[in-house]
Image: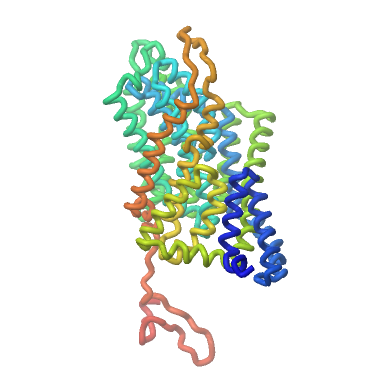
Amino acid sequence: MEFLTANLAPLMFGTLIVLLLLGYPVAFALAANGILFGIIGISLDLLTPALFQALPQRVFGVVMNDTLLALPFFTFMGLILERSGMAEDLLETVGQLFGSIRGGLAFAVVAVGMLLAATTGVVSASVISMGLISLPIMLRYGYDRRLATGVIAASGTLSQIIPPSLTLIILADQLGRSVGDMYRGALLPGLVLVGMYMLYIIGLALFRPQQVPALPPEARNFREPNGNTGTRSLIVLMSVALGVAIGTLELVVGPEAPVDEQVVTGMLLWGATAFVIALIDKALNLGWLSAIAKRVTFVMVPPLALVFLVLGTIFIGVATPTEGGAMGAVGALLLAWARKRIDLKLLQQAMDSTTRLTCFAIFILIGSTVFALTFRGVNGDLWVEHLLTNLPGGELGFLIFVSVFVFVAAFFLDFFELAFIIIPLLGPVADKMGIDLIWFGILIAVNMQTSFMHPPFGLALFYLRSVAPHDDYRDHVTGRTVARVTTGQIYRGSIPFILIQLLLVVIVMACPSLVMHYKGDAKKIDPSTIHINIQGPGAPAEYNPFGDSPASDASR
């Protein structure tokens, strides 16, 4: 009995691990574990029955959390855009744009993965869309199967780190930090990861060109009557639009605007200018632009403009993440309606999927709340704190342990489960050690991204396996028989990209400025300029708490 009383917290944590390994649903395993050990704690006189009286308030607190409203809004936005055919249009357009170079299709998959990450925020939608559309084309023209499957799965997971990621919303909520700051901090690491994927493909194109062939001329659909690709027209259009955006930016936002506001407004002006020029050319049949220039403008500018509008209002502080998500959902509906690609059936499917995903997340959060209530009641938070603060190496030792622990746990748990179970235990310890929680959250998010790529349980690999050909088939374009894609090829293809993701973990750990730039635009206040007006009989009109003399009239 004394052993049980002294070790109730570690026994509770160990029981949770056993329940999860046995395959019980995470939400119910968490809640049942919390209630079971709560009853044990009451029977041992460690807890009082009044502890569970706080449970209804905790549950209502979860349901009333405004930040979590962003989850259904961003999910709905992404599903509407994905199911309205945006993914197909983007992949076809970018594939034609880069198809003439070695590795062009792989570049297209990474670029579209980044765009889908910024619009859908859902891994399953990105992986399945690119697997259905890009994989047959890559197999048709002789891409290495391991590279083709690996780049599709890895690009689909970009939605975990590139805003408006659902993972970042949950991490911000669990760490008690601003979603906007979390989005700002994640932007550069996300772009760095995209660049590392591109560098890997460039390396393959240079040293193993047979694995990443270029598209043959007959497969390039957007060509001019004289046989040119039309890329010169696209470069001219984008250069003119960029010049107009730079020239009018200062007039629109002013020279003193924050960097975030200038970048977002500049991108919107750039896209709007290109779109207007393309509209004028199409309406008046002027023939200024090539087919590929018009295709890129009409397909890529609208969803990108929606993304920059939504994220920009959050970055600038005009809208909260919930308001930005609502605006994005309405914008997605308008885009789908403008392209005549929305009907009642699509709307119902998107709403059903959004409801299921949101309920899944909320039930896990409620379960983790029940678990945390009892775990803290038996001083489990102090046990975890003493366990982690006594690690050798201090702060660096703690970060290395956390990274390894999350990497291993990701073999068995997905990102929702990791965020709701692990973060409430690790976040307070990191805060007491003086670690910036936004940087800590991004470090965890990059690490959790590998959970989708781990053989044999990575969900991105399962999604890709579900749409990859299981049997040999005859290609309808070339007429040749294409061999099936094996599960082993999918697993082996994921390994280089897992290593790239782990390298990004090391880079974020070694270069905190990649994330900490989110503080760059914060206004610095000089305490000596702060004055307190005290109203009352005989009180001075103004008091400077940091000086010995009243403030002068000039400083008021």
Q: Is residue 37 left or right of residue 553?
A: right
- Name the quadrant containing residue 235: top left
Residue 282 position, x and y percent, is 46, 22
Q: What colouring method underlies this structural image?
A: rainbow
In the rendered image, the vertical position of residue 352 relative to residue 135, given as above or below: below
Residue sitting nearer the eye, 475 or 185:
475
- Name the quadrant containing residue 467: top right
Residue 388 position, x and y percent, is 45, 62
Question: Can residue 204 be seen here?
Answer: yes
In the rendered image, the vertical position of residue 486 relative to residue 431, given as above or below: above
Residue 435 position, x and y percent, is 41, 61
Residue 276 position, x and y percent, is 44, 31
Q: Residue at x 36, y 54 (%)?
A: 517
Q: Which residue is drawn at 40% across and 37% down?
A: 270
Question: Can residue 279 be seen here?
Answer: no
> Given the current orientation, which residue lies at the most extreme bottom position?
538
Q: Which residue is drawn at 32% across and 23% down?
A: 232
Residue sitting nearer the eye, 524 or 469:
469
The C terminus, quarter of image: bottom left
Q: In this view, does 230 lie to the left or right of 420?
A: left
In the rendered image, the vertical position of residue 112 relative to residue 35, given as above or below: above
> Given the current orientation, which residue lies at the most extreme top position?
479
Residue sitting nearer the eye, 225 or 56:
56
Residue sitting nearer the eye, 186 or 494:
494
Q: Is residue 349 left or right of residue 134?
A: right
In the rendered image, the vertical position of residue 412 relative to residue 493, given as above or below: below
Total labels: the figure holds 0
The N terminus, quarter of image: bottom right
